[in-house]
Amino acid sequence: MEYELLVSRATLKPGDTVQVKGKILPDAKSFIVNLGKDADNIMLHFNPRFDYHGDVNTIVCNSKQHGVWGEETRETNFPFEQGGKVEVSFTFAANEIKVQIPEGHEFSFPNRLDLDVIEYLIVAGDFKIKALKFS
């Protein structure tokens, strides 16, 4: 069963953080967190893949501008477990988003769209949301 939570008309500015807490489904293939302006303008597409589209235990990140996907990047630090609980934090900076994943791992993804505010957030896939916190 796939889940989805959409937040529109949010107002995240540089310095703001959003934390996503939840449980990964036991037979999960992947889940996503998208942050941006709208569905066609995504600053960060965060997609942990357990076994999906040829990727195994890999985090795929990308951006989308005017409906066109950019170049994917891959993170091989994969601290996620099927059936496990997880918390991921996204901190918006003017030129990047800092992503804090479990086990103290962190990486950054550039603000390719030069957005000065994040208004759109979607969490979807094989992930059941327990909490969403903006700070």
Image: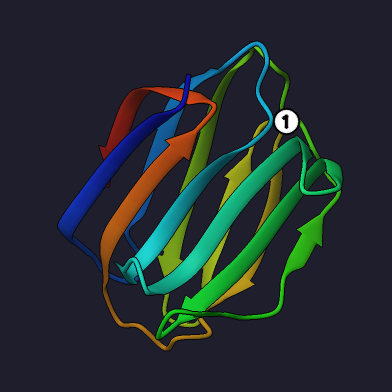
Residue depicted at x 62% and y 68% = 62
Q: Which residue is the extreme one toward the left?
A: 9
Q: Percent x, y for residue 119?
A: 23, 65
- How far across and down, in percent of the image, does residue 41 sit? 38, 76
Vertical placement of 40 versus 65: above or below? above
Q: Secondary structure at mark 1?
A: loop
Residue in the foreground of this view, choosing between 115 and 45: 45
Q: What is the three-letter code of the residue carrying label 1?
A: Glu
User: Residue at position x 35%, y 35% from top?
Assistant: 4
Q: Which picture quadrant has residue 71?
A: bottom right
Question: Viewed as shown, does residue 123 lie left or right of 28?
Answer: left
For mark 1, what is the residue?
Answer: 103
Where does residue 87 sit, x and y in percent of width and height?
52, 29
Q: Residues within 10 Å of mark 1 (few under 14, many from 20)?
A: few
In the image, residue 72 sits, relative to residue 48, either above or below, namely below
Q: How many marks?
A: 1
Say above or below: 50 vs 82: below
Position of residue 108 measured from the top left corner of the image (x, y, whole percent): 64, 65
Q: Is residue 116 left or right of residue 69?
A: left
**Residue 78, placed above or below residue 53:** above
Task: Please tell me in which quadrant of the rendered image residue 124 appears.
Answer: top left
Choose between 68 and 46: the one closer to the eye: 68
Q: Is residue 106 left or right of residue 34?
A: right
Asked whether 115 or 53 is in front, the reply is 53
Which residue is at 53% across, 38% downward?
88
Q: Specify the color scheme.
A: rainbow
